[in-house]
Every structure is written in C-alpha cells, then in structure tokens.
Image: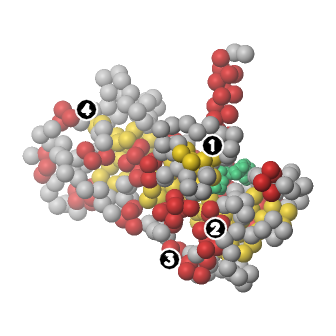
Amino acid sequence: MARNATNKLLQKAKKSKSDEFYTQLCDIESELQYYKNHFKDKVVFCNCDDARISNFFKYFSSNFKELGLKKLIAACYQEQKKELFNTENGENGFFYEYTGTEGEIKHPGSTDIVYFNGDGDFRSPESVELLKQSDIVVTNPPFSLFREFVGQLVKYDKKYLIIGNINAITYKEIFKLIKENKAWLGINLGRGVSGFIVPEHYELYGTEARIDSSGNRIVSPNNCLWLTNIDNFKRHEDIELTKKYFGNEAEYPKYDNYDGINVDKTEYIPLDYDGYMGVPITFLHKFNPDQFEIIKFRKGSDDKDLSIGGKCPYFRILIRNKRLQNKSLNGSVNNSRQ
Ligand SMILES: C[S@@+](CC[C@H](N)C(=O)[O-])C[C@H]1O[C@@H](n2cnc3c(N)ncnc32)[C@H](O)[C@@H]1O
C-alpha cells in the first residue's frame, strides 16, 4: 500500500480510537464547578452519552437539585457496550430523559432507556429534535467529528461546554468562533484534564496510563481542552504583564512577513508594546477579551506561515493589547517608546 494511504489509515484508526475515550467524573466535576449558576431551570443534553454508564449523566443526575435543572437528557449512538448490556438492539441509538421526579438515581437501568428508530447519531433528526428542546449541551463528543459537532451547536444556537483536543483551536471554524468571542476555552487544559477511561481492547500507552481502584483503564493524553460559550471567571482576569519591549527589542524579533513581533511565551508579552504580537496558541487559555484583541491566526500578510529569518515558529496567534489602544485613542501619553 502506498505510504500516504497507510498514513491515512493510521490516522483514521488513531482518530476513531480517541472517539472511544470516556470521561472521568473527577474531570467533569473539576470543570463544572465553575459554571454552577448557569444551570438553573435549564434542560441539559448529553448527546454522545449512554446514560447507563456516562459520567456526564452521573454528574448531572447526582447534582440535579443543587443545580436546579429542569431536565436532563442523554442520547447515545448505537450500542456502546453490547457485551456489557447484552441487548438485541445493537444498531439503534437510544436516549433517556430524567426530570428528577423519578427519584434519585445515578444511572438508569437497561429497561428504562428508549430506543430511537435510527442509530442515534448526534446529527440524526431524532437526536436533533432532542437538541432543539435543550438549553445546554455538555459532553465529550467524538473527536473525529468535532467541527461538525460544534457547527451543529452554533446552528441551533445552543450553550455548550464540551471536551476537545487542543488542536481543535487550529481548525479555522473553531478559531473563527474564538476570535469573534463566540467561544472560549474552559478552565482546565492539557494536564488539567487528568485522563480518560478506555475500553478493554485499548492499549494502555504512556507513562501515566493506569488502572484505577474501580478497575477502569485510564490513559492521560494531556492534550485536551474544554470549549464553551458559557461565561467563566477566567476570561475576565487580566494576564499579568511584567516584561518590557523597549530596551529589550532583541528578545522580540520582527516577523519577515508581518508588521509584528514574536513572543515565545504568554508570560513574555510586553506591557509596553501597542503593535501586533504573535503568541503561542496556549495564550487562549489566559485570554481576556477586554485586555487583548485577536487579529488573525498563523499567517503573515503574504498568506504564508509567519516566519522570522526564514524560519517558522510553531503556530502563532496575532494579538494586540487593547488597553494600550484605548490609551492612545484617549490621547493620554503613551511614552513607553521615549
Ligand atoms: C470521546 S467518546 C465520549 C463518550 C462520553 N461522552 C464520555 O464523555 O464519556 C465519544 C462518544 O461518541 C460516540 N459517537 C461516535 N460517533 C457518534 C455520532 N455520530 N453521534 C453520536 N455519538 C457518536 C462514540 O461511540 C463515543 O461513545
């Protein structure tokens, strides 16, 4: 087989493998604690979740009263654990609705779920019908369909808090949402998401792979983010700036193909530079839209990757300090260059 085709196959296998990463309750709790006041009287939809095993379902059913939820719906694509539940309807998806009147449960049983006529794909009309009835979608969707998943949430104008791979920032559709302040990163990122439960057949790779006290097989890819359009405190906190550009120009080389300077780490962003700066994508984790403006991603004025002396640093996001712009506009003296 040609090398390209083999690579493609490998990539596909890798992608579909991470589609079977199940989220741990501890990681859900550690992010959800920051959004508790957004759930009152809301219908929450976990649309890639088997209510019988999903920790998203468990989190919301266990905290149903505390959050003041109106309804919780979980919908699942085909039969996720045929061997575990031993059911006949392997090709059909199913869903489960919880209103809190059923008494306290963590998970429903197999006889409580309702089968769809179709496969329960999040894009299927039956699942979309449930989406329409919902206010907030919270889940870890299949990574290989991340763009489509977010696209659907945008189309139906839903609030969401979802897990994705950090690379998702580099997708043009996702970056556009972030640039326009229609989506932002959650609180936990990278190592902040401790690991995922993987199926039996999945190889435990990496130094942090483990089996937890309940026998769950866990891998820690340390490369995930939460993407959301629900407000959180972090995006209102300024990044503390301590470095200066003027006097240290050599540390901030100019790009060959853009009128801006390169900054290697978010904490090196100078406090006195009012022009364009290229920063690493992890900047987005600290981004406060009142402090900085995102200009564009990765490319210089010639539409080629940003370069310095012919070399391209890893993806950069071009930003500008808004507060320095405001100062200049208000006519107050910005004498940092003097
Ligand atoms: C990354 S896993 C996460 C599962 C669960 N949400 C969790 O966090 O534990 C993604 C899930 O989406 C399911 N899935 C794959 N394709 C799907 C589709 N087209 N529609 C809905 N779910 C899908 C996968 O089978 C898998 O269970």
| Residue 2 seen from this side | yes
For disc 4, the neighbor class at 10 Å (few under 14, some 14 to 19, many from 20) is: few
Q: Quadrant of residue 8?
A: top right
Residue, disc 2: 58
Q: Secondary structure at mark 3?
A: helix
Please state the horizontal and vertical placement of residue 305, each as a whole percent of the image.
43, 30
By what rule are the colours in the image chosen? Answer: secondary structure
Please state the horizontal and vertical placement of residue 91, each as a whole percent of the image.
86, 51
Q: Residue at x 44, y 53 (%)?
A: 192
Q: Quadrant of residue 326?
A: bottom left
State the residue in front, 112 or 166: 112
Mark 1 CB in 8 Å range of ligand 1?
Answer: yes
Closer to the chain start, of discs 3 and 2, is 3
How many angstroms separate mark 4 from mark 2 (CA)?
50 Å
Q: Relative to 327, say whether 20 is above or below.
A: above
Quadrant in which the N terminus is drawn: top right
Q: Is residue 254 left or right of residue 111?
A: left
Residue, disc 3: 37
Q: Secondary structure at mark 4?
A: loop
Q: Residue at x 72, y 60 (%)?
A: 50
Residue, disc 1: 18
Residue, disc 4: 253
* In this rendering, the label closer to the viewer, 3 or 1: 1
Under mark 1, the amino acid is: Ser
For disc 2, the neighbor class at 10 Å (few under 14, some 14 to 19, many from 20) is: some
